[in-house]
């Protein structure tokens, strides 16, 4: 933070998600009146200079670099945003934290568990804010679901069925780039999309203690890449609740099919991203023949929505999720508060579950998440 109350951001990576982040940074100050006075887009670094130039032109990043150390070690940067392929997250985030920067890192936290644990440990020691971008959990409907669970509005969770299914990788001819290289990505659909639904499951039902996973390659891609296109995981939570999680990037017809069905002993909550501005809640007397799910339109009663729209049901969208997520981080930094959600510790817990799922899929056995 400078004395003017501005937060100066440096971003590493100028690909797809960097554009979404750029839009988010641009809208945080206007959206939240309890955050920084300004957000400077100080510097963008990308190994491909033309990409960095394009992002700079489109969103006004002031300086362009090709070496990420010019961001993590820059004097004019307070926050480093890590938006590069998964294998690079740990080295960049740790260097930034060790140079006194706050860090906002894309998901999954790292390509493997060892790196994720190292990142969480350095973050803990650093006293800096370290956030991982599992922003679906901050989505107003899902954040409200968490409030309902905390209030006991649906009783004790007994079962959680969650999924994130897409079809962007269903075309065998499509070059998935780093995402299809296990050394760069860590896992296929499990790391890319499964990590999101694991985070939501943990957020709503607590830590997962053990699991049994089945993983399949369902797209016959050129070369010999065998990567998980589809993963199904039976889980048990520490709380003794159970559940089933599914993730795929290659199931035809599923675009951004993220959803869950949480059943407690006093009610239930259902959510689907395809109707992301509503949520269904079941409460009341099961013996009442008129008892059933209520459809609640998202509005001022749900977290953050009144910052965007005045009327319930007007709707917020995918980019707003990033304004909310980045807003949480930048407001924390402006307050001098390093606690954030989702934290690197949350990211490392998701990586534990991903690692256990990979082990289980390999062995065919129930596996402890340790
Ligand atoms: N939160 C979400 O929902 C969400 C959505 C999409 C992507 N992501 C995550 O964001 C990250 C980036 O994904 P993407 O879709 O933007 O990928 P992308 O391939 O579009 O962009 C990655 C960029 O990183 C650059 N890069 C690669 N190596 C570099 C290096 N050594 N130094 C500097 N730049 C380098 C590439 O040139 C490229 O411009 C991944 O971790 C991904 O999982 C998250």
Image (cartoon, rainbow, N blue to C red):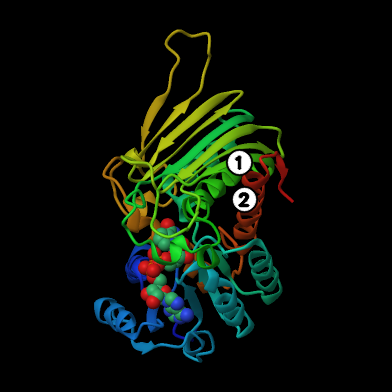
- Residue 66: where, in percent of width, then height? 41, 87
> Which residue is at the far front?
223
Residue named by callout 2: 358
Q: Secondary structure at mark 1?
A: strand
* Residue under the point 60% across and 85% down: 99
- Residue 243 sits in quarter: top right
Q: As drawn, is 311 to the left or to the right of 10?
A: left
Observer-nearest residue: 161 or 275? 161
- Residue 299 sits in quarter: top left
Q: Can you say whether 172 is above or below 278 in the image?
A: below
Q: Quadrant of ligand 1?
A: bottom left
Q: As drawn, is 80 to the left or to the right of 40?
A: right
- Residue 90: where, in percent of width, then height? 59, 73
Kindly report the distance in space between the C-alpha atoms of the residues bearing marks 1 and 2.
7 Å
Residue named by callout 1: 213
Q: As drawn, is 360 to the left or to the right of 42?
A: right
**Taking the image as drawn, is residue 257 in sight?**
yes
* Residue under the point 35% across and 48% down: 170
Q: Can you say whether 133 is above or below 281 in the image?
A: below
- Residue 285: where, in percent of width, then height? 53, 14
- Residue 236 sits in quarter: top right
Q: As drawn, is 343 to the left or to the right of 334?
A: right
Few, some or many residues within 10 Å of mark 2 (<14, 14–19, 20+) = many
> Which residue is at the far bottom?
75
Few, some or many residues within 10 Å of mark 1 (<14, 14–19, 20+) = many
Q: Can you say whether 261 is above or below 222 in the image?
A: above
């Amino acid at each position: 933070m400078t004395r003017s109350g501005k937060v100066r951001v440096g971003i590493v990576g100028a690909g797809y998600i960097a554009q979404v982040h750029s839009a988010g940074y641009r809208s945080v100050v206007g959206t939240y009146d309890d955050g920084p006075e300004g957000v400077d887009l100080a510097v963008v670094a990308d190994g491909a200079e033309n990409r960095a130039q394009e992002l700079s032109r489109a969103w006004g990043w002031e300086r362009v670099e090709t070496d990420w150390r010019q961001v993590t070690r820059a004097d004019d940067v307070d926050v480093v945003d890590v938006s590069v392929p998964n294998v690079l997250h740990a080295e960049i985030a740790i260097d930034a934290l060790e140079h006194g920067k706050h860090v906002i890192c894309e998901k999954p936290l790292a390509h493997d568990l060892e790196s994720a644990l190292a990142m969480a440990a350095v973050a803990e020691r650093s006293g800096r804010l370290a956030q991982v971008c599992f922003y679906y959990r901050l989505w107003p409907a899902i954040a409200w679901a968490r409030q309902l669970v905390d209030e006991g509005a649906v009783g004790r969770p007994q079962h959680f069925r969650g999924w994130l299914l897409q079809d962007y990788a269903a075309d065998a001819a499509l070059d998935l780039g780093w995402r299809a290289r296990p050394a760069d990505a860590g896992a296929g659909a499990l790391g890319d999309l499964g990590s999101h639904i694991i985070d939501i499951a943990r957020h709503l039902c607590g830590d997962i203690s053990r699991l049994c996973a089945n993983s399949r390659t369902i797209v016959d891609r050129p070369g010999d890449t065998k990567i998980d296109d589809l993963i199904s995981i039976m889980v048990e939570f520490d709380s003794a609740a159970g559940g089933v999680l599914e993730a795929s990037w290659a199931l035809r017809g599923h675009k951004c099919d993220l959803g869950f069905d949480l059943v407690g002993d006093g009610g239930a909550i259902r959510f689907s991203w395809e109707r992301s501005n509503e949520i269904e809640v079941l409460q009341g007397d099961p013996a009442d023949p008129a008892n059933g799910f209520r459809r609640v339109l998202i509005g001022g009663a749900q977290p953050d929505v009144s910052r965007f729209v005045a009327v319930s049901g007007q709707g917020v969208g995918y980019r707003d999720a990033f304004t909310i997520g980045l807003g949480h981080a930048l407001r924390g930094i402006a307050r001098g508060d390093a606690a954030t959600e989702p934290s690197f510790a949350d990211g490392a817990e998701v990586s534990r579950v991903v690692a256990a799922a990979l082990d289980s899929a390999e062995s065919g056995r129930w596996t402890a998440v340790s």
